Image: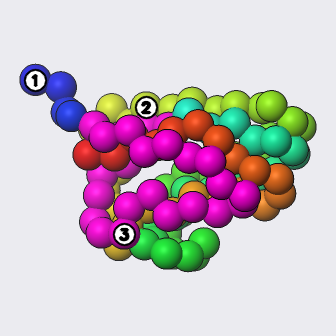
Amino acid sequence: MAAQATVVPVNAAATQAIAATPATLRGFWLVTSAAATVTIYDNASAASGTVLAQWTTAGANADKEFDFADGARAVAGIFVSASAGTVTGHVRIG
């Protein structure tokens, strides 16, 4: 049986807490409104801690999708941060 995931919508002006407790990052699909560096952290409430994923977009409406086959365990929680603009889409946790 495949691992189950919960979809958490993202609609944030730069940052959003995804999980405030330990969770497994299963994947994401995120779109930026401007050129930005997007980072997903192992942190319940701030843009710091262990980096779980990071990428840079070249401009508006750039998207990134990724599936973690076995998941990436976040011991503190999951937090999304974009260096500019807004970020929309979803993060899958389990």
Q: Which residue is mark 1?
A: 1
The Cα–Cα distance between marks 1 and 2, rounded to whole angstroms, is: 16 Å
Residue at image coords 56%, 46%: 10
Q: Earlier in the sequence, mark 3 or mark 1?
A: 1
Classify mark 3: helix, strand or loop.
loop
13 or 30: nearer the eye?
A: 13
| Quadrant in the rendering for residue 14 | bottom right
In the displayed image of the protein, which residue is found farthest to the top? 1
Classify mark 2: helix, strand or loop.
strand
- Where is residue 22 shown, x and y percent of the image? 28, 66
Q: Residues within 10 Å of mark 2 (few under 14, many from 20)?
A: some
Q: Earlier in the sequence, mark 1 or mark 2?
A: 1
Magenta stretch encompasses residue 74: no
Is residue 54 visible in the rendered image? The answer is yes
Magenta stretch encompasses residue 10: yes
Q: Amino acid at mark 1?
A: Met
Q: Residues within 10 Å of mark 3 (few under 14, many from 20)?
A: some
Left or right: residue 53 compared with residue 38: left
Q: Which residue is mark 3?
A: 20
54 or 10: nearer the eye?
A: 10
- Where is residue 92 shown, x and y percent of the image? 39, 40
Q: Amino acid at mark 3?
A: Ala
Number of the front mark, 3 or 1: 3
Q: Which residue is mark 2?
A: 67
Main SS class of the magenta portion in the image = strand
> Bounds of the magenta span?
5-28
